[in-house]
Amino acid sequence: MENDKKTFDPLNAVGIFWMFFGILVLIGIFFSTSNLGRLMNGICGMILALTGLFAFMRGFRNRKRKPAD
């Protein structure tokens, strides 16, 4: 019989935080007055959001692979 116990992977929490923070930075594009500010908010927001998505997916994959103790 398999053990169906869920394990906690910190990458899930970190990924969710980075995605949320990246989305907030992307929303900051609308409040910037200069084109350089918009460009920097877009680049930094995308980096944060994509890194967060990558961390979340990696944590999800690790949780599926790792057997629960």
Image (cartoon, rainbow, N blue to C red):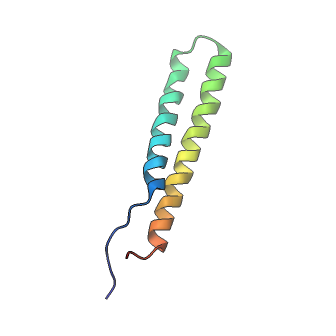
Quarter containing the N terminus: bottom left
Q: Is residue 53 above or below residue 40?
A: below
From this viewpoint, which residue is outermost toward the front?
69
Quarter containing the C terminus: bottom left
Residue 18 coordinates in the image, percent (x, y): 50, 41
Look at 54% across and 53% down and name the residue there.
55
* Residue 41, picture quadrant: top right
Residue 64 coordinates in the image, percent (x, y): 45, 70
Look at 53% across and 46% down and name the residue there.
52
Q: Is residue 35 above or below residue 19?
A: above
Look at 49% across and 73% down and name the residue there.
65
Give the camera-side residue of 3 and 42. 3
* Residue 36, picture quadrant: top right
Residue 7 coordinates in the image, percent (x, y): 37, 66
Give the camera-side residue of 5 and 35. 5
Residue 44 coordinates in the image, percent (x, y): 62, 32
Q: Is residue 11 above or below residue 49?
A: below
In this image, 35 relative to 14: left or right? right
From this viewpoint, which residue is outermost toward the bottom?
1
From this viewpoint, which residue is outermost toward the right?
36
Q: Is residue 46 above or below residue 62?
A: above
